[in-house]
Image (spheres, helix red, strand yellow):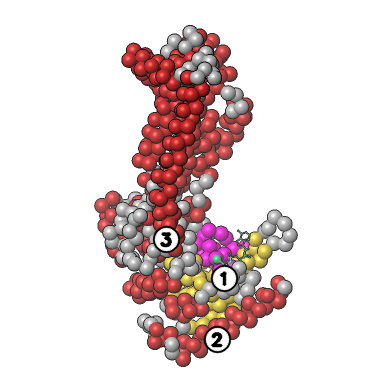
Amino acid sequence: MPVILSADHVSKVFATGRGDPIVAIDDLSVDIEEGEFVCLLGASGCGKSTMLNMFAGFTQPTQGSVRLRGTPITSIEPRCGMVFQSYALFPWKTVRTNVEFGLKVRGMAKRERRERAQFFIDMVKLTGFEDHYPTELSGGMQQRVTLARLLATDPEVLLMDEPFAALDAMTRQVMQEELLRIHESSRKTTVFITHSIDEALILSSRIVVLSARPGRVKAILDNNLPSPRHVDVQLSPEYAELKKQIWDLVESEVRHHDDTQG
Amino acid sequence: MVTLGPVGETTPATAVTDQGHLRRRIAVPWMVLISLTSVVVVMTLWYVSTEFGWILPIFLPKPITVLQEAQRAFAGGLLLTDVWMSSQRVFLGFALAGVVAIPLGVAMAIWAPAKAILDPFVSLLRPLPSITWIPLTMLWLGIGESQKVAIVFMGSWIYILLYTYESPTRVDPLLIRAARNLGARDLDVMTEVILPGALPGIITGLKVTLAISWSCVLSAEMVAAQSGLGAMIWQAKDWGNLALVLVGMLCISITVLVADQAANLIERLLLPWERNRRH
Ligand SMILES: Nc1ncnc2c1ncn2[C@@H]1O[C@H](COP(=O)(O)OP(=O)(O)OP(=O)(O)O)[C@@H](O)[C@H]1O
Ligand SMILES: [Mg+2]
């Protein structure tokens, strides 16, 4: 599969008002292939969101480059669609008009965009809630609206920054299954941030483990667990082994981080 | 409470709101009762103190006198004319202020030079109470309707401007980022995100200003006018008719309350998404 998204020796330094600048990402390189489901895994503050924001074009690297199909990303890039942890739905728009937003700004005719929006609303199982406002929905439902709104614009890459972190365990599981189903059918390249090893194991085809700050690639692991990854897979020795392997990588990072901090 | 679809998706936050609603529902009759009691107590005090001559009628008329005066004023139709005249002036001055100040406020928020141009004048004009405009406006416009409208305008537009200018800056930057990520261009961000996001703030500003507009018209009418609620209570004072002064004051309260309720209604119609906001 061809590389669609790549980070090439990327560093990101934030100047702070007082004291030393913060190095959030240091010389990070990774190639993401078309159709992959990549999980970025790392301790809090290691620069995961920063990396994703660079893929979306919200910020630019201090050194190195991020590229979409070989072209550097220098401004906000709608082909890399972002699902925000805090949903970022427009509170004054209903479910329907939220989902229609990306189509409207592309100048799609009203009837056509309504039809297309309905397709994605049905897809995330929100049929019947078209005329509700986001404030009238639960967290899980709002996150599904965000997903539908993004999928309707057909981005080439899905960027997801801990999208399910705020959900309760049961809703999270439902959402994970739905996301996998969508990925299975659309084969859309997905970069997914999490700091849950289990979530990474259940969702990904590849796991990129980042070091503690500044973020570097600590290890890249292929995840060849059979799918669908139901409970029986989660109880298999392969799963446990992979989990242990990742845990060892992450643990050494957390401890190392504590040492340098303390 | 809105039904939230699939079971198991109701978040703890909802449960908390539910309890809050419950507590409020029980609490309301008690609070109403206490309010009623406090009104009755004050009315009784008024009645007793004037009836037994503890307070002389030239300082505070008896409730019954006020009631009779109110009846007379209503029957003559003069009171309603005054209410109508004042309302008209407020409405014209307020609407004019909105038409001028909202676009200026938006311009200030999104275009720095507009802010630079207007800032010095806003700083200088803001501390001036509207009555300080009475001499100039009388010189320019006489003492007719346009002068009253001008006072309301001068007393209102700066507040509308300041609220409007503040509102777009309160729009969540994440929403702007999300809009751009979904392919929105500058104009889309303006019309689809910044303006609707600023609308609640602008409307709050209009509501606050409406009450200010009312106090402007009343002071303008007290100084120089033949009609309107302000003129009416001023004249009643000159005639020594204290009961009529009280009727006028009550009438002002009620009119402003009604205007406020109308504004709330319009707000709910314009901002349907704010109705079910969870706190
Ligand atoms: N705009 C900014 N200005 C200054 N420092 C920043 C900025 N954004 C991020 N940082 C710093 O960069 C580091 C990485 O932040 P980032 O948000 O990418 O972490 P993260 O891996 O997403 O953490 P978490 O898992 O807690 O979300 C942090 O130390 C943070 O303080
Ligand atoms: Mg983060």
Q: Are marks 1 and 3 in contact (CB under 8 Å)?
A: no
Q: Amino acid at mark 3?
A: Ala
Ligand 1 image-quadrant field: bottom right
Q: Is any atom of residue A240 visible in this view?
A: yes
Residue B71 image position (x, y, % from top left): 36, 17
Left or right? Give the position of B256 relative to A97: right
Please identify the quadrant where the N terminus of chain B is shown: bottom left
Instruction: Give the residue furthest to the bottom.
Output: A237
Q: Is any atom of residue A103 visible in this view?
A: no
Respond yes or no on whether mark 3 lies under 8 Å from ligand 1: no
Extent of the magenta region = A47-62
On what subunit does the disc labeled 1 rest?
A
Q: CA distance from mark 1 to mark 3?
A: 48 Å
Residue A245: mark: 2
Q: Relative to the observer, which residue lies in front, B165 or B36? A: B36
Instruction: Please name which of the two marks, 1 or 3, marks the residue nearer to the observer.
Output: 3
Q: Amino acid at mark 2?
A: Gln
- Which residue is found at the position 46% from the left and 23% from the top? B47
Residue assigned mark 1 = A8
Instruction: Please name which of the two marks, 2 or 1, marks the residue nearer to the observer.
Output: 2
Of helix, strand and loop, which one carries label 2?
helix
Residue assigned mark 3 = B15
Q: Classify mark 2: residues with Cα within 10 Å, few (<14), some (14-19) or many (20+).
A: few
Say which quarter of the image contains residue A121: bottom left
Q: Relative to the observer, which residue lies in front, B257 or B43? A: B43
* Label whose residue precedes the other's in the sequence (2 or 1): 1
Of helix, strand and loop, which one carries label 3?
helix
